Image (cartoon, rainbow, N blue to C red):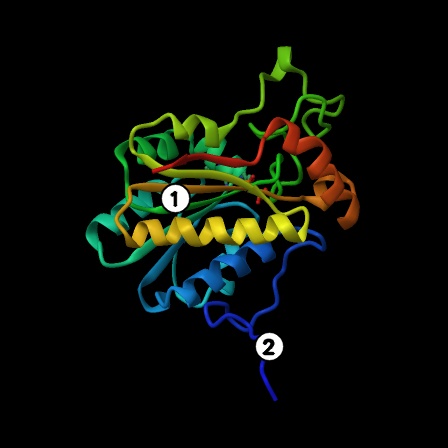
Amino acid sequence: MKKVFERPKSLTDVHFTYCAGCTHGMIHRMVAETIDELKIQDRTIGVSPVGCSVFAYEFFNFDMVAASHGRAPAVATGLKRSLPECIIFTYQGDGDLAAIGTAEIVHAATRGENITVIFVNNAIYGMTGGQMAPTTLIGQKTETTPFGRDARAHGYPIRIAEMLATLEGSSYIVRTSTHNPQNVRKTKLAVKKAFENQLNNKNFNLVEILSTCPSNWGLDSIQSLKWLEENMIPYFPLGEFKNI
Ligand SMILES: Cc1ncc(C[n+]2csc(CCOP(=O)(O)OP(=O)(O)O)c2C)c(N)n1
């Protein structure tokens, strides 16, 4: 019989522990499929910092390094510079990358480090129970903004992809989404390109992926996909911001 479906070899045979409707698992799978397709499993090293994906090393079937909160781009820089033949990626949430790790990501991009960054933007701090993140939308209710994020009190949500695209050292900066199959397919293509670029020594590559957090948004899985589409995409437009 013809085999039409196979678990990527770059994923371990372990069940994901993410909440129902969370898209971290889907994004892990896209990364794993890409690594299989590019045949780089034996020389890929992922860096997973703090956040819901802190246990990514349980799920990815290649070397993983745990970084402290926000520091993944610095760890990835050291790995890539000392092991240039290896393919190095970071897998970071918005609390991680856009709050405590802002300095690391900006300087890794501006230095043009030849790494791949998978940036999972779910507009909230997931792991710690739903506090406001730098990407939380104006009016969005979180544990720390129970009346909704207010620009005067809490500032404005940060658009990371647009900001990093202005830096000389970045080469591929794109924002995609996971809210329907068409956009999942586009995300997969973007993830693959971000890894291919590293293989071709093309400086800094980042895929920002709009993602869901049903548990902390207080919505079910289907409502979350709808909420993402209707609320996140107008503020975080999809598309390529840089492709050199
Ligand atoms: C130095 C440090 N500061 C704060 C924390 C607490 N902390 C753990 S996860 C997290 C936020 C994670 O949110 P995000 O990066 O958006 O990832 P998600 O869980 O939503 O996937 C925070 C603040 C920590 N572990 N270490």
Label 2 and label 1: CA atoms lie apart by 36 Å
Q: Nearer the viewer, residue 23 or 98?
A: 23
Residue marked by disc 2: 4
Q: Is residue 205 left or right of residue 138?
A: left
Q: Nearer the viewer, residue 97 or 188?
A: 188
Q: Is residue 151 above or below residue 75?
A: above
Say what secondary structure mark 1 lies in.
helix
Q: In the rendered image, which quarter is residue 109 located in? A: top left
- Count of numbered badges drawn on the protein: 2
Q: Is residue 243 above or below residue 152?
A: below
Say what secondary structure mark 2 lies in.
loop
Residue 102, image x, y percentages:
42, 30
Type of amino acid under label 2: Val
Type of amino acid under label 1: Ala
Q: In the rendered image, which quarter is residue 232 located in? A: top right
Q: Does the image show residue 66?
A: no
Q: In the rendered image, which quarter is residue 27 located in? A: bottom right
- Residue at point 48% right, 57% down? 31
Q: Look at discs 2 and 1 and give the one toward the viewer.
A: 2
